[in-house]
Image (cartoon, rainbow, N blue to C red):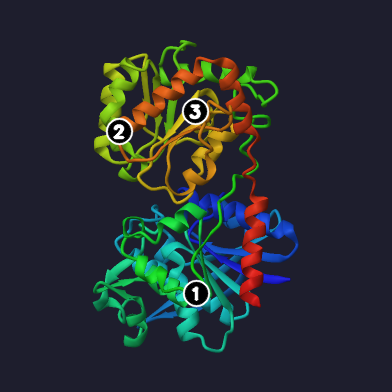
Amino acid sequence: MIKVLFVTSEAYPFASTGGLGEVSGSLPRAINVTGRAEVSVVLPMYLSVKQKYYADTELVYEGEVALSWRKQYIGVRKTDLGNVKYYFIDNEYYFGREMIYGNYDDGERFAYFGRAVCSMIAAGVVTPDIVHANDWQSALSVVYLKTQYPAFSDKCIFTIHNIAYQGKYDLRIASDVFGLSKEEAEILTLDGDLNLIKGAIILSDAVTTVSPGYAFELSDGFYAFGLEGTLRERKDGILGIINGLDGSYDPATDRTLPCKYSSSDLSGKEICREKLCREFCVDNLKDRPIVSMVTRLSEQKGLELVVRVAEELVRELGVILIVLGTGRREYEAFFRSVSEMMRGSVGYIDRFDNSLSRLVYSGSDMFLMPSLYEPCGISQLTALKYGTPPIVRETGGLKDTVVPYNEYTDEGTGFSFRNYDAYEMKDTIGYAVSVYKNKNRWNGIIKRAMSADFGWKNSADEYVKVYEKVMR
């Protein structure tokens, strides 16, 4: 059996800020179920993790990590959750903080993390056949292992979850902060800066990303953010494997909902709609479809398009608009303003709450994701599972997972538009509203959406194939 160490900066339920945490919490479990690989996970023991889970862990290793001229304590603590062993890198100086990301010394913090992972391997705490690193925070574990630990024959796989975040730093700190020689720094150099993801892409034995569509798009400079040349140099290419959806997302078993429902009995969805309208202070008018968003308020998520036509969606198309999320202040201010101006038709809550988000998925009629780019996306998968047809822009994983409705064959699970254009999005929403009025057709879309299979089994099988290929 292939032994894999899954290196990540976050993993649900311990620490999670988004898609990476969801994947790191679900994929290892699914791979272990196959019986063909044994995956363990390592992540930092952040302050929030220590406060909640420290008592459930045991110390399995203590030592010292050398990072350039620094010598730092390392404690490795372990716990089992389900069928996965989790290891935590314990260091108060780097990880005993309120924020997981956004600290002034994140480069040094995750350089330490990468070095600590190599140290625990060197000490025999774990003896993996493959190190599977994820995103820029884990990239240096690949770089250090391949360049500074020649005694180990561990294979390395690197997964890109969002290439927009690359770990870029001034070349002048390569030695002092990262402990890289001149030759090693050259491997990571791109456009005059150190680029941590570039190093992992070059040195890994295989590179994957989170959807076939995103893998294709990464050959384009717009989507690859300057790394398209590096990716093209890989003769084996970059493999796109679609993310799955955790089994806890199921309206038939979801205890957070006011009423459970299934594709064979959708009556509970109406009760969820009623509560959703109360929570967001909007009118529950059955002839007006609820179009919702659960999102980080950023340019990537297509908020510019929504801001441009939000009032027209309400006044001309007659939709009720609901938005849940936080992010850039100008977007938050806009949705606060428009929800005041159009009371009863627009609802906005500026926080993220897991139970509330599930209410949005269950109680809405349509789910809007007009992303500028979207490597995979979990929200559209959740919307499908909860019987809320997504309206998406055809990019990355959105194009891979949402089948546009075809009125001539009565097929499809949602709606899509191609160009990053507010009025093309508006026209697509308008078309969805017209289909919504035909309840037989609309219920058919809902049932097909809820029947779509995006569990982790298929993804796990694909990753095991990558592991087996690398080992060969």
Q: Position of residue 312 (x, y in %)?
A: 29, 21
| Chain-order first, disc 1 or disc 2 | 1
Q: Is residue 184 visible?
A: yes
Q: What's under tag 3, amino acid-wise? A: Val
Q: Which residue is mark 2?
A: 422
Amino acid type indicated by mark 2: Ala
Q: Which residue is mark 1?
A: 204
Q: Quadrant of residue 120?
A: bottom right
Image position, residue 90 (x, y; %) = 50, 66
Q: Earlier in the sequence, mark 3 or mark 2?
A: 3
Dot 3, how many residues are within 10 Å of its Cα: few (below 14), some (14-19), or many (20+)? many
Query: In front: 166, or 324?
Result: 166
**Residue 52 image position (x, y, % from top left):** 55, 50
Marker count (numbered) = 3
344 and 82: which is toward the camera: 344
Q: Residue at point 36% right, 27% down?
A: 427
Residue 162 seen in render: no
Give the farthest residue toward the front: 408
Residue 202 image-quadrant placement: bottom left
Of the residues tagged 1 and 2, which is closer to the observer? 2
Residue for badge 3: 360
Q: Is residue 106 above or below residue 406?
A: below
Amino acid type, label 1: Ser
